[in-house]
Image: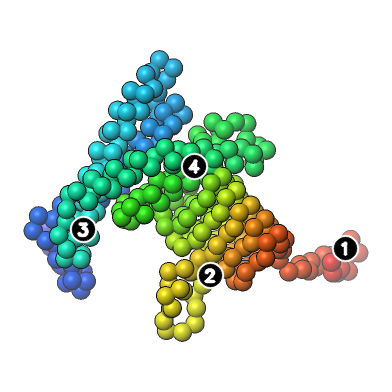
């Protein structure tokens, strides 16, 4: 074991030297995925105390929410401080503890709005899925709802200046659901992901209100020819999906294209250009080769 330990130390040192990564005196570590997961669980319990929390009919709901939220925010505060200290070391700029406190205050102040957005998402799922028996079933069981809850929390933190913690939250959701939403993506109210597995939404995607996606939809970026990317291609490289759009399973939409309001994008469609409002887009004609009972091929 001693030999393996020395070899591992040598590997760590080689990587740090290659990437100019030297531990500063007093380095406290990175934000912890385990602690961030505890934060998310606590926030979900505070937002929905009787469905995602442990409040029962005999519980003082307000007291439960206050205590649960307090614990989650205290833990989040420590993780935000770790992240800001990390960025401070990266940028060789001094760190101010008040910055973490400000992020926490603004994040906490936005929780009622986040709760309202999640309520609109759950309602959209209930209206959009005839198999749903209740809004409670959606909130408790549906992977799309779970992924969107994580995104609403992560997006707020991303915008406030804690992108590393936000990314951890999005990856926790990805692990749990198979739905990959970058915390930078902007998503309007009444958003519904049905089934969900394999959905990918990129960092600069903008999604309007009342949009519905099905499994394996990709809102991604194009790999453009040439050595460099323009400012627009780098910072606005994912699609814009306007209000009331439905995108069916397996569709791939790449680049800074706009899918116009009220459009329907069929399954397995590949799109790299704008689509006007109220469009109905399907894949090209499919030719089937079927062998008849007589053994002669028929084309359809």
Quick one: label 3, few (<14), some, or many (20+) residues within 10 Å? Answer: some
Which mark sits nearer the N-terminus, 3 or 1?
A: 3
The quadrant in which the N terminus is found is: bottom left
Give the spatial CA distance, label 4 vs label 2.
Answer: 27 Å
Is 228 located above or below residue 280 in the figure? below
Please tell me how crowded label 1 is: few (under 14), some (14-19), or many (20+) other residues with Cα within 10 Å.
few
- Compute the Cα span from label 1 to label 4: 54 Å
Q: Which residue is mark 3?
A: 86
Looking at marks 4 and 3 on the same chain, the residue that comes earlier in the sequence is marked by: 3
User: Gap between marks 4 and 3, in whole Å?
Assistant: 31 Å
Identify which residue is drawn at 68% across, 61% down.
277
Do the numbered discs 1 and 4 sit on residues whose CB atoms are within 8 Å?
Answer: no
**Residue highlighted by disc 2:** 255
Q: Callout 4: few (<14), some (14-19), or many (20+) C-alpha neighbours within 10 Å?
A: many
- Where does label 4 land, which residue? 117
Q: Earlier in the sequence, mark 1 or mark 2?
A: 2
Sequence-wise first label, 1 or 4? 4
The answer to whether the residues at label 3 and label 2 have Cβ atoms under 8 Å apart is: no
Q: Position of residue 211 (x, y in %)?
A: 60, 51
Residue 280 place in picture, x, y as percent: 72, 61
Q: Residue furthest left?
A: 25
Q: Nearer the viewer, residue 110 or 131?
A: 110
Which one is nearer the viewer's eye here, 261 or 26? 261
**Would you call the spot at circle 2 few (<14 residues within 10 Å), some (14-19), or many (20 or more)?**
many
> Element under label 2?
loop
Give the residue displayed 16% in from the left and 56% down from the top.
95
Mark in the foreground, 1 or 2: 2
């Amino acid at each position: 074991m001693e030999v393996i330990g020395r070899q591992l130390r040598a590997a760590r040192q080689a990587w740090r030297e290659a990437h100019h990564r030297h531990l500063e005196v007093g380095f406290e570590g990175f934000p912890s995925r385990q602690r961030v997961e505890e934060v998310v669980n606590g926030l979900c319990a505070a937002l929905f105390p009787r469905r995602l929390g442990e409040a029962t009919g005999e519980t003082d709901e307000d007291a439960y929410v206050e205590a649960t939220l307090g614990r989650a925010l205290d833990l989040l505060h420590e993780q935000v401080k770790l992240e800001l200290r990390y960025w401070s070391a990266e940028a060789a700029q001094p760190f101010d503890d008040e910055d973490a406190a400000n992020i926490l205050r603004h994040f906490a102040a936005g929780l009622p709005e986040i709760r309202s957005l999640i309520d609109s998402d759950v309602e959209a799922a209930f209206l959009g899925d005839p198999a749903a028996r209740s809004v409670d079933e959606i909130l408790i069981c549906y992977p799309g709802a779970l992924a969107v809850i994580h995104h609403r929390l992560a997006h707020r933190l991303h915008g406030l200046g804690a992108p590393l913690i936000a990314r951890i939250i999005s990856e926790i959701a990805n692990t749990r659901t198979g739905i990959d939403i970058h915390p930078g993506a902007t998503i309007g109210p009444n958003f519904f992901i049905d089934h969900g597995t394999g959905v990918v939404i990129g960092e600069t995607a903008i999604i309007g209100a009342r949009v519905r996606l099905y499994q394996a939809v990709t809102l991604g970026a194009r790999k453009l020819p040439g050595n460099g990317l323009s400012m627009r291609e780098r910072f606005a490289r994912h699609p814009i999906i306007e209000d009331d759009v439905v995108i069916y399973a397996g569709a791939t939409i790449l680049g800074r294209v706009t899918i116009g309001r009220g459009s329907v994008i069929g399954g397995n469609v590949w799109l790299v250009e704008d689509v006007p409002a109220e469009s109905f887009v399907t894949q090209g004609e499919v030719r089937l080769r079927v062998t008849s009972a007589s053994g002669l091929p028929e084309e359809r």
